[in-house]
């Protein structure tokens, strides 16, 4: 797990530069002090923060043309804010007693949702009699992912709450469903009690007593093809006097999540939208509220329903940061902007960014690099089709030009939708940190005769640090803010040795 941070500065013609993103549970909000004071960043005990001086360098490697233009966006008056990937279960120390100028990436929805079934995997066929976990035979499912029929003697299986090392709540879970058939909770789920009342109340209550890494398994062992089992909901145990069975239909998020987010200034939904590896092209590809699962992993699924992201921002009063899928067509962009315009609190600004690190070979946005087995990435192919790629071109030039081109096209579509309220939009232009990167071409690429950076409000980059920390780091769940800062100071910036 690595971490990246944000730095903000004002530009002569634009609002600010943001050096953004992060993937370590960083609790530096407290270090900044209350009331937005950032005095801690001058503390000589924190040499890692002093090293942020490298951000004052001119954007782009030495020797690349358009030096004057890059100097226009040189960073000054740095105001540093750290953004972390975070799961609610592990962020007790991230709370602050007062508001701090810090944004937050969100990752993992399992701890956030009241209905934990929305994080389950796609159903697969299993053989319970012969203990065959996955037969490999495809199931026939409806548009929401529920099996419409079963082969005799076989079941449809899914699981959730797995992979947490057993770190999820014990207690009584309630399963609701529509349709006719039989469901068997298994593995961590024990002591099931069935309620059907002649099909009027399709409900199962089960307990989790000793949670494990396997998690909760749900098997559909029988389903009526004319009234197949569907719309499964699994409601987490009561918390702090809140019985979620009475509220889950209107309140999708745990109160604990809302409390933990209260002091942040922006919520970046890159992970919740399944941005990396996103298969989304058209508006119809998005996740619907009725779908079985709202999570995504490595291209399976399209992330959370956008209605839920808007709901979270409306309830917390925190502005959203949306990442548009790298293959999304113009109609998708227009429809998304329309939904946000019509449903989001009109007092909230909106950050909008094209995808996430499109040039990064670790993501399917750029899964196949030029020259590897003759396959090219989506971004490279788009650039090549426009004459921006050639055998002798700098490696990152095609990616930079395409990111700039599509970003500005996206900005224009959103602004057209918002019309007189277009000033609510914060147009984010992504850049790359490190030697030999795409940043000069992102900034200087001409779109309709104007450099891309002049058509954006925010420039967002991604230097990494502290890559060795993660859930398996001994004692990390007990670290204080000072423990974390001390550990981060002892590490090397990934920026010093990598191109990302």
Image: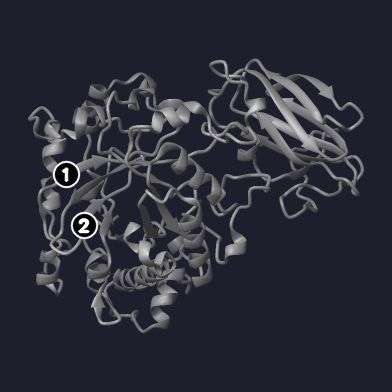
Horizontal placement of 340 versus 383: left or right? Answer: right
The residue carrying mark 1 is: 79
Task: Pick out the residue farthest to the bottom.
Answer: 387
Q: Residues within 10 Å of mark 2 (few under 14, many from 20)?
A: some
User: Residue 370 sits in which quadrant?
Assistant: bottom left
Q: Which residue is drawn at 34% across and 36% down?
A: 24
Secondary structure category for the residue under label 2: loop
Task: Pick out the residue farthest to the front.
Answer: 420
Contact, mark 1 vs mark 2 (Cβ under 8 Å): no
Q: Which residue is drawn at 36% across and 54% down?
A: 351
User: Residue 396 sits in which quadrant?
Assistant: bottom left
Residue 486 position in % (x across, y down): 21, 26
In the rendered image, the quadrant that contains the N terminus is top left
User: Residue 484 sits in which quadrant?
Assistant: top left
Residue 113 position in % (x across, y down): 56, 34
**Vertical side of 137 occupied by 337: above or below:** below
Residue 404 position in % (x across, y down): 32, 70
**Which of the two residues, 158 or 287, is positioned nearer the viewer here?**
287
Q: Which residue is drawn at 21% across and 57% down?
A: 15
**Residue 297 visible in the snapshot:** no
The residue carrying mark 2 is: 15
Q: Which residue is drawn at 92% across and 29% down?
A: 198
**Which of the two residues, 332 or 25, is positioned nearer the viewer here?**
332
**Which of the two residues, 314 or 446, is positioned nearer the viewer here?**
314
Per the model, the C-alpha gap separating discs 1 and 2 is: 13 Å
Horizontal placement of 256 versus 499: left or right? Answer: right
**Vertical side of 321 occupied by 177: above or below:** above
């Amino acid at each position: 797990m690595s971490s990246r941070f944000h730095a903000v500065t004002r530009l002569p013609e634009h609002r600010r530069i943001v050096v953004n993103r992060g993937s370590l549970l960083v609790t530096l909000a407290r270090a900044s002090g209350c009331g937005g004071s950032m005095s801690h960043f001058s503390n000589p005990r924190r040499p890692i923060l002093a090293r942020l001086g490298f951000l004052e360098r001119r954007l782009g490697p030495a020797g690349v043309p358009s030096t004057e233009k890059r100097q226009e966006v040189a960073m000054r008056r740095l105001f540093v804010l750290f953004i972390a990937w975070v799961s609610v279960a592990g962020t007790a120390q991230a709370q602050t007693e007062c508001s701090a100028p810090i944004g937050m990436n969100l990752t993992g929805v399992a701890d956030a949702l009241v209905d934990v079934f929305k994080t389950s995997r796609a159903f697969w066929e299993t053989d319970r009699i012969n203990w065959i976990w996955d037969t490999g035979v495809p199931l026939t499912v409806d548009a929401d992912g529920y099996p419409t029929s079963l082969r005799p003697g076989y079941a449809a299986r899914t699981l959730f709450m797995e992979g947490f090392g057993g770190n999820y709540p014990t207690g009584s879970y309630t399963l609701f469903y529509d349709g006719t058939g039989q469901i068997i909770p298994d593995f961590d789920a024990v002591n099931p009690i069935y309620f059907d009342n002649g099909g009027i109340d399709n409900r199962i209550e089960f307990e989790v007593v000793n949670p494990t890494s396997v998690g909760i398994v749900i098997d559909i062992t029988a389903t009526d093809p004319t009234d197949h089992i569907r719309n499964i909901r699994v409601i987490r145990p009561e918390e702090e006097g809140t019985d979620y069975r009475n509220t889950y239909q209107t309140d999708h998020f745990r109160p604990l999540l809302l409390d933990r987010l209260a002091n942040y200034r922006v919520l970046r939904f890159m992970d919740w939208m399944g941005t990396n590896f996103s298969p989304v092209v058209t508006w119809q590809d998005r996740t619907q509220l009725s779908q079985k699962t709202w999570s995504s992993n490595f291209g399976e699924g399209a992330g959370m329903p956008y209605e839920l992201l808007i709901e979270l921002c409306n309830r917390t009063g925190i502005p959203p940061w949306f990442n548009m899928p790298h293959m999304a067509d113009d109609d998708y962009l227009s429809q998304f902007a329309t939904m946000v315009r019509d449903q989001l609190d009109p007092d909230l600004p909106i950050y909008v960014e094209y995808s996430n690190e499109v040039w990064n070979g670790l993501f399917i946005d750029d899964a196949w690099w030029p020259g590897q087995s003759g396959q090219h990435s989506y971004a490279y192919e788009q650039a090549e089709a426009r004459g921006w790629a050639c055998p002798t071109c700098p490696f990152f030039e095609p990616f930079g030009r395409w990111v700039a081109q599509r970003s500005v096209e996206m900005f224009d579509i959103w602004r057209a939708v918002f019309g007189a309220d277009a000033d609510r939009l914060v147009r984010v232009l992504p850049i790359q940190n490190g030697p030999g990167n795409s940043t000069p071409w992102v900034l200087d690429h001409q779109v309709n005769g104007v450099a891309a950076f002049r058509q954006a409000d925010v420039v967002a980059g991604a230097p990494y640090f502290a890559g060795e920390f993660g859930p398996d780091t001994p004692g990390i769940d007990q670290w204080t803010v000072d423990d974390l800062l001390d550990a981060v100071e002892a590490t090397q910036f990934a920026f010093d040795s990598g191109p990302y």
